[in-house]
Amino acid sequence: MTNAYSFDGLVVFALIFISTCAYVRKVPRLKQWFLSEKKGFFGVFYKASVIGTRLHLAVSSLCVLMAVYLVLFR
């Protein structure tokens, strides 16, 4: 288990958040409802989905590296 207040927990949360928003962007019905706003509080979801879509290779490799780190060093 990772602690939410440690750096490891924050990195895991950010990676999961970015991956989830990128997945929601691929589903048309959810995209209209969830990612329609580009500014304000809900703009964070839109920006995370753009990061996840454009940097999918970096995000996926960071997910794998974080999983290996958590299994071996935690």
Image (tube, rainbow, N blue to C red):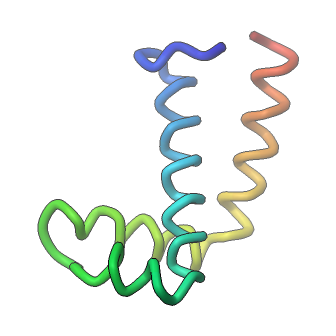
Give the farthest residue toward the front.
29
| Residue at screen point 53% across, 25% down | 9
Left or right: residue 36 compared with residue 7: left
Q: Position of residue 72 (x, y in %)?
A: 87, 17
Q: Position of residue 39 (x, y in %)?
A: 16, 75
Q: Position of residue 20 (x, y in %)?
A: 55, 59
42 versus 11 height, above or below: below
46 versus 12 height, above or below: below
Left or right: residue 32 compared with residue 6: left
| Residue at screen point 51% across, 38% down | 13
- Rendering quarter of residue 67: top right
Left or right: residue 74 compared with residue 28: right
Left or right: residue 8 compared with residue 47: right
Task: Give the quadrant of the N terminus.
Answer: top right
Task: Give the quadrant of the C terminus.
Answer: top right
Q: Position of residue 42 (x, y in %)?
A: 23, 65
8 versus 47 height, above or below: above
